[in-house]
Image (spheres, coloured by chain):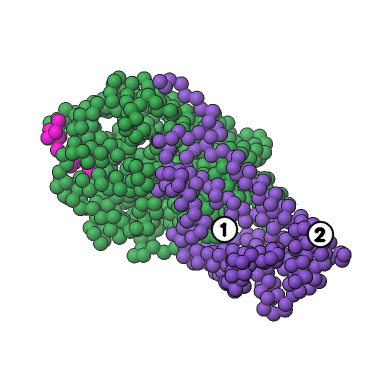
Amino acid sequence: MANFETPALREYPIIPLIHAGTMAHSKPFVAKAEYQQPLGFPGALVDNWESVAVKKLGELVEESRALRVFLDSCVKCGACTDKCHYYLGTSDPKNMPVARQDLLRSVYRRYYTLAGKFFPKLVGARDMTKDVLDEWYSYFHQCSQCRRCSVFCPYGIDTAEVSMAARDIMDTVGVGQKYSNEIIAKVHKIGNNLGLPEPALRNTLDGLEEDVKDETGVDVKFPLDEKGAEVLLITPSADFFAEPHIDGLIGYAKVFHQAGIRWTLSSHASEAANFSMFIGNHDNLHKVAIRIREAALDLGVKRIVVGECGHAWRVAYSFWNTLIGPFDFLDRNYPVPQHICEMTYDLIQRGALTLDRSANDGKIVTYHDSCNVARASRMGSMPGGQFVIPRAVIKASVNKFHDMEPGSIHESTFCCGGGGGLLTDDLMELRVKGAQPRMQALQHVVENHGVNYMAAICAICKTQFAKVLPYYQFPMDMIGSVHGLVSKAIQLGTKE
Amino acid sequence: MSALTIIYAVLFYAATVVLVGGVAYKVYVYASTPAPLKIPTTPAPTTRLGVVGRMLREVTVFESLFKSNKWIWLFGILFHFALLLVLLQHLRYFTQPVWGWVVLEQPFGIYAGFIMVAGLFGLWARRFLVDRVRYISNLSDHLMLALLVAIAVSGLTMKFVAHTNIIALKQFFLGLLAFQLQPLPADPILLIHLALVATLMIIFPMSKLLHAPGVFFSPTRNQVDNPREHRHVAGWSASINNPGGR
């Protein structure tokens, strides 16, 4: 399949010894000028880029308390060194969170601290050189910004913040990543990651209506741009096309249908994903998100519900109110925004849905906590609701459920290996190796409980797993949407 | 007054100014740098009081470190609490009369010195024995441990091997506090101990020792998880002005 070896799955997780440089060759394609300029970045490496980069680093530190505290506080205790799935899967020491941070911290120290200015060797401070830039490009694109390290750091240092800053600096000097920047440019132009224009989207949704009608005999609607709907659904565009995402979208539609909630999608804001977070650029972050406010106002909806997407839920839950609020025009009896799992969970609690678990009896299910949902957001009113609610929705839809090992779920969940803007074929080796810790935990429940299905609520996770499961000898259709399970279990025609 | 006394007096005044001024400056910088987005590592408390609890657990029992690695936690907590006891015990050299609770703490403070050294050697051993930690250690990380060990060992030496003139030393420090110079005993071990302590004070605000004030300002730990309920804006996000609401 490829010119690298898929890591072995072991009975017990082991922490590998370091092997320096094993992933030094891993680099995503560089963005061409046509993908840089729509985002406001130079098209190629600028002249005197060294001083531009150093200046930008200083500005970022000035405007972010997190970055400032994180760059100062690390004591190199080593607590994070065995926490990154990319380190565990590749054994490259620069994939240890502290070592990844040090790629940038060393430059910060050289230019912005006394010790680094006068005793660079002593404190590991480095000049901003082309070698350093190349190393940044390689290793800051080996971080999925999953925040697992930040759970375990005694000071809460979050490598995601450092890698976002590094990518912002690289974009500023003209060295952007093709995958993320091409996608963001599409959203600016068309409104979604796939570059799917309104007629194509409408066509797809019409097709889905026909499919569901054929399968169930029920007229489940997939409305688009319907003014006066109660709910605007913002979902990752992968839900319109990709497998197994699309089963999730069908599930949402069936839930809305049975609950009798008038809902709509928007062709202007047809994307929940916001890859600008991955590149750490707040102008683009705002520009992508504001389409959703515009659509909500234009359509006159009362609520916004967000579909199954991990980083999108982080942006929606944690950042939307800041970026595109205030939401004084929406119905405050509901959380703004509300996760689709929160909505379905509430409807189940109120008895508004008829679910027949036995419809999923062929499946023995486990659940993969997506990193941005687990460690950067919440569902419901209690801390940790993001772990309880999706599982409650699953357990209402299936009879057989088994969690993976405690060290690999909830706040300790392992990234799928494809998050943070790394879900691109030019990083396949990294993606396969980075999935190893998750695959190992999965293997355990497969062997001990006969698990044959892993549900997730993240478009990136679903795509990533569909691709990497076969490398580990699992079937690719083992991964599915939580609302795909709901979709199977829901008994249409019983409530409406 | 001997040149030695004058040198050490100047050294300690300077070290105190650097330590207090430096940390105060850093705290000011941390406090005045905006946190434009909500980034608590979740699950996080949903109330201010809950955050106070999270922070207290973080700085007293090292909650995150405990989740992470039991060895680092053990050595870390031994070192830090022993250091705390030793520092409290040292209050007796700066107070007259000595406060009652410092007298009671005295025996703990003395033996804590050994625990401090044990914790430091545990942490230092990891820098050699664990390949991952060896990889991330800079020269400065080793020197920091060496400095702390040297301070502890020189202190213990004066307590258990070669007593120094502790009465005169106390006069010296009480004198410094009253801005009146008193002679400092010319005991080599004492001079080493004091010079190392002054060094530590001076490098504190420009080194990784900033983790002490820094942790309180870490947004992943000190932010309340309530972004849907309260619109958070700061720094660049405060200048966002979205049209169209009602």
* Extreme residue in the bottom direction: B161
Cα–Cα span, label 2 and label 1: 42 Å
> Numbered disc 1: what chain?
A
Please give left or right for residue A72 compared with residue A300 in the image: right
| Residue annotated with mark 2 | B180
Answer whether residue A247 is visible to the viewer in this image: no
Structural crowding at the residue carrying mark 2, measured as other residues with C-alpha within 10 Å and reported as few (<14), some (14–19) or many (≥20): few
Mark 2: which amino acid? Gln
Provide the secondary structure element on which disc 2 rests: loop
Which contiguous range is marked in magenta?
A484-496
Q: Quadrant of residue B194?
A: bottom right
Q: Relative to residue A211, is residue B172 depicted above or below?
A: below
User: Where does residue A249 sit, x and y in percent of width and height?
Assistant: 27, 35
Residue B61: tell me if it is visible.
yes
A162 vs A53, left or right, is left
Location of the C terminus of chain A by quadrant is top left
Residue A92, relative to residue A142: is it above or below? below
> Was residue A307 drawn as part of the magenta stretch in this picture?
no
Q: Nearer the viewer, residue B229 or A106?
A: B229
Q: Which chain is purple?
A: B
Q: Residue at x 47, y 24 (%)?
A: B242
Where B130 sits versus A317, above or below? Answer: below
A236 or A472: nearer the viewer? A236
Residue positioned 41% across, 44% down in the render: B46
Q: Nearer the viewer, residue A433 or A492?
A: A492
How many dots with numbers? 2
Indicate the amino acid at tag 1.
Answer: Lys
**Chain A in the picture: what colour?**
green
Mark 1: which secondary structure?
loop
